[in-house]
Image (spheres, coloured by chain):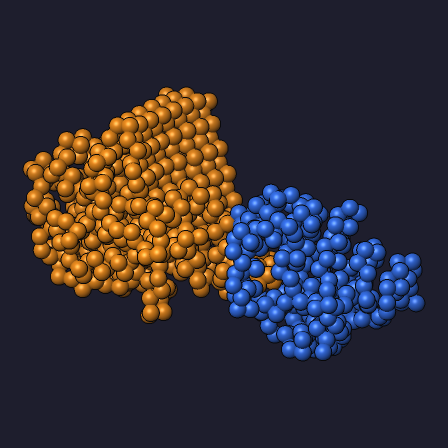
Chain colours: A blue, B orange
Amino acid sequence: MSLLRVDELRVDVDDKTILNGLSLAVDAGEVHAVMGPNGSGKSTFANVLAGRPGYDVTGGTIAMDGADITELAPEERSHRGLFLAFQYPVEIPGVSNMEFLKAAVDAQARIRGEDEPSAPEFIGRARDAASRLDLDVDFLKRGVNDGFSGGEKKRNEILQMLLLEPRLAVLDETDSGLDIDALQVVAAGINAFRDEGNAVVLVTHYQRLLNYVVPDRVHVLTGGRIVRSGDRSLALELEEKGYGWLDA
Amino acid sequence: MPDQDTLQDLVGREHAATGSDYSAGFVTDIEADTLPPGLDESVVRAISTKKEEPAWMTEWRLDAFRRWQEMHAPRWAHVRFPDIDFQAISYFSAPKGDAPKSLDEVDPELLRTYEKLGIPLHERARLAGVREEDMPEVAVDAVFDSVSVATTFKDRLADAGVVFCSMSEAIREHPELVRKYLGSVVPKPDNFYAALNSAVFSDGSFVYVPKHTRCPMELSTYFRINAENTGQFERTLIIADEGAYVSYLEGCTAPMRDENQLHAAVVELVALDDAEIKYSTVQNWYPGDDEGNGGIYNFVTKRGACLGERSKISWTQVETGSAITWKYPSVVLRGADSVGEFYSVALTRNFQQADTGTKMTHIGPRTKSTIISKGISAGRSQNSYRGRVRMNPGAKGARNYTQCDSLLIGEQCGAHTFPYIESKLPSAMVEHEATTSKVSDEQLFLCQQRGIDPEKAVSMIVNGFCRDVFRTLPMEFAVEAAKLLEVSLEGAVG
């Protein structure tokens, strides 16, 4: 059974069809890259997986571990282990990063019937994760994304992923706007996260992240559907020839 | 974090079984001695007689009453309500029987009421399983309708020289202080409701902290309106003598009733040289039902006078209750280098209306004031900040900083800001910053995506918005305030 299975997904935004029969299956232990030109529906795909309001699913299904999640609320998908790293992380002034992370981890623990981690235990985990991502400890005390640089926001998304330990991580253009050092730090975070029990969907425009996070499969999304799938070499071919090559 | 049931409801927050989220809305069945509705001089005299007041006090009341009769209810606030029929209100209601002389004599039914509200009216450790030294001790004066029913820790406070008692007792036991300061900060004809209060006030708290004394514990008053068709008119007077410090907390609740009830209090604070008074309110009067029926009209005059040099008065308020709130805790900065602060969180939802803010009047040189106001509107409510900063000609080197932020939840509510700046001194520094924002769909989605349910998310976002104010509250009060907001916000999403 696939960890994530998307079948013939159709999605409208403001009465315009964006996804038009997208199908994809991702097994546990795998990293898939979904690539495509601007406007191909990549971010729509990432957001629809997470259940963001404003996207109208007109057909098809999304299933995790065989269970249909197409109609579930965003927090219910999260409770099943779905995580979305945002392309443009929003700011929540006055709510410290630490407080936000603890609330999220506590909510997840409650759903699983586990004990919430104690404050000292959680602070320890958060500090470890922050230092792995080259983030200063003070970073955890600041308001969520409040005044963060673009690179800090992206690293903060990865930090949240490491602490929440999702089953399925969907990373929406996490590589965009990162300099090469930050890209390597983020890639190291993703590589540390991957294991046999989880899966990663990398949504990206460029293949450069794939130099550091080697995908098992690469898919090309254009016109709202997957038009080609292959192994890593497909990404390299795309980089060389451009997305226009697919139309030829 | 220790178990926080402690002051669990200085603000009355447990969920009632009825499904309503106003947990303090029950009625205590107790025999009361209540004056019939109506107001004339004989009623004023009757209140004074019931309280066995000296003649000077009776005259003081009558003078206030005569002035009140010549005044008109103010109409400038951004609130709407039908005219109040002052002849339909009863001005005095007290539990029957002689005033209890000690805690042991308090009617068990009353003790149960306060227990239900989470207010400790006993002096032992309040929570099983919590070491006593971990619990901050709080002395409580409990005011039930028109009278103070109990004041705790009086002996311990007396050892430190601190007077903490009901206003009735203060009039009898400390007439020199009362005569000197009562009405000195809020004069009888200050405004319509203050004049009314001066005529008919029934009880309230009195605090005197002597020179160079730090009050050994937090003081608090818990106001409870119980009787039907009764107004509550309490009077509080706090005097911090030279170099004294006191922190005072105020909480309030009332039963759910379909009629509106009037609460018109007056609070006066006096700080002499180097004294500091910190006054915190968590106001949770019954706000009315979700269709706008019933609820308390909270028309309150609160003012502090920094008479002494380097004195400081700090108001913090968390306003979540009342159908209509109309209050402006203010500071008159007379002493040189004195400091006034106002920190406010006002949350309105359903059909609630709030017109609240502060007045900072700078008279002495180098006086400083800070105003931080956070207004949160949800439902169909209207939330207004109204503030006045005045710099008198003698206030050389005076400074004010005002920050006024509004947060909107939903599409049908309103937020308004009415700042007035009157400077007769070109060199004075007055800064005003204002923002209006919304709880955005993006913020909500981020929280939900991380597994946090939407109501919890909104309360977290709102708490973050209020952080600057909550950090000024005593710790256990801050926890309560955050929880109260959480409960008040339930149903605000969607």
Look at the image and tell me whether residue B78 can be seen: no
**B486 or A180: nearer the viewer:** A180
Look at the image and tell me whether residue A35 can be seen: yes
Picture coordinates of residue A53, whole percent (x, y): 61, 66
In the image, is B194 to the left or to the right of A22?
left
Picture coordinates of residue B184, whole percent (x, y): 23, 32
**B363, above or below A87, in the image:** above
Picture coordinates of residue A94, whole percent (x, y): 53, 47
**A67 or B189: nearer the viewer:** A67
Q: Residue at x 61, y 66 (%)?
A: A78
Q: Residue at x 58, y 66 (%)?
A: A75
Which quadrant of the structure image shows residue B287? bottom left
In the image, is A81 to the left or to the right of A102?
right
Q: Across the whole image, how many numbered discs are drawn on residues?
A: 0
**B242, above or below B255, in the image:** above
Q: Residue at x 38, y 22 (%)?
A: B365
In the image, is A6 to the left or to the right of A95?
right
